[in-house]
């Protein structure tokens, strides 16, 4: 039943993630933490995400904004290594509480979806973002929608947002998994659980891509904001559950 649940969770998470620009994977955190163990959530979920990304890259390849990738990825690789070191040495649960508060605040920043942007955004900002966001992702398994406000403020929606986020995460993901393995945080049974999630993610990507074509940019923006708020609530609840 655990394998079936993880597989179905992977499908649902990636359908949600495709339709809302990300955040579906964040829904995996409480599921994996409840049925397995909070201490192994990050490596298992990141492995599952990594397996699902090649299919998403194939589906959205032509929409990738490579200028953003060039700015984001180098610092993200460093962030992945630093994050893995922190993961095996320290507890930094308070970070997810701050993330949750930030995500919930986006509903007010975008005036419930009426605004297209909430602050000025430049390409250079993706350098520090790559570093800090990847540290957080490596620590907790997913950052969900935390990057969405920055992409929205670069006027990236629907296919462009999903494609660019996936390219960034895929390249940085090699450093994440390599660091987990080197430090002994990803081994044995964890590989199997991550692979099962990843297989579900593959199917979720395909279904999500078909559904994405049927929604407007306006609806997509509203779904992005909705999932940011839901993700924020999940992070806050998870913080108090673990602590």
Image (cartoon, rainbow, N blue to C red):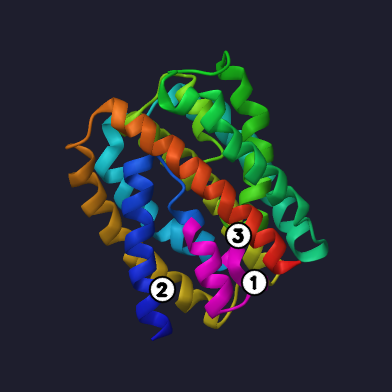
Please report whichever mark, 1 or 3, sits nearer to the chain's N-terminal start.
1
Q: Quarter-wise, where is residue 201 in the image? A: bottom left
Label annotation for residue 38: 1
Query: In the rendered structure, does residue 33 fall within the stretch colored magenta?
Result: yes
Badge 2: residue crowd in 10 Å (few <14, some 14–19, many ≥20):
many
Question: Closer to the camera: disc 3 or disc 2?
Answer: 2
Label annotation for residue 6: 2
Mark-to-mark CA distance, 1 and 3: 21 Å
Q: Point out residue 232 in the picture as x, y percentages from the top left corner.
A: 58, 47
Q: Nearer the viewer, residue 81 or 164?
A: 164
> Looking at the picture, does residue 176 appear above or below residue 191?
above
Can residue 70 be seen in this snapshot? no
Badge 1: residue crowd in 10 Å (few <14, some 14–19, many ≥20):
some
**Residue located beneath label 3 in the image:** 178
Q: Point out residue 51 in the picture as x, y percentages from the top left corner.
A: 40, 60
Quadrant of the frame with the C terminus: bottom right
Q: Nearer the viewer, residue 51 or 233?
A: 233
Query: In the rendered structure, does residue 37 fall within the stretch colored magenta?
Result: yes
Relative to 90, is 62 on the left or the right?
left
Q: Nearer the viewer, residue 136 or 81?
A: 136
């Amino acid at each position: 039943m655990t394998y079936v649940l993880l597989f179905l969770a992977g499908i649902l998470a990636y359908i949600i993630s495709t339709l809302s620009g990300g955040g579906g994977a964040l829904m995996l955190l409480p599921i994996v933490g409840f049925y397995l163990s909070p201490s192994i959530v990050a490596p298992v979920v990141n492995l599952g995400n990594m397996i699902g990304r090649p299919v998403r890259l194939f589906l959205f390849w032509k929409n990738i904004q490579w200028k953003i990738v060039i700015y984001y990825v180098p610092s993200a690789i460093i962030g992945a290594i630093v994050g893995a070191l922190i993961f095996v040495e320290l507890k930094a649960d308070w970070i997810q509480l701050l993330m949750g508060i930030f995500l919930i605040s986006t509903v007010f920043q975008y005036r419930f979806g009426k605004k297209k942007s909430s602050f000025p955004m430049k390409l250079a900002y993706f350098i520090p973002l790559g570093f800090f966001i990847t540290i957080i992702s490596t620590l907790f398994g997913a950052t969900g929608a935390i990057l969405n406000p920055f992409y929205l403020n670069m006027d990236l929606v629907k296919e462009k947002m999903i494609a660019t986020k996936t390219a960034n995460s895929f390249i940085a993901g090699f450093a994440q998994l390599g660091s987990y393995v080197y430090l002994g945080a990803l081994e044995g049974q964890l590989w199997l659980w991550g692979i099962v999630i990843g297989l579900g993610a593959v199917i979720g990507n395909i279904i999500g891509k078909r559904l994405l074509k049927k929604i407007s940019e306006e609806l997509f923006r509203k779904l992005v904001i909705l999932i940011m708020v839901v993700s924020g609530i999940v992070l806050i609840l998870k913080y108090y559950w673990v602590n």
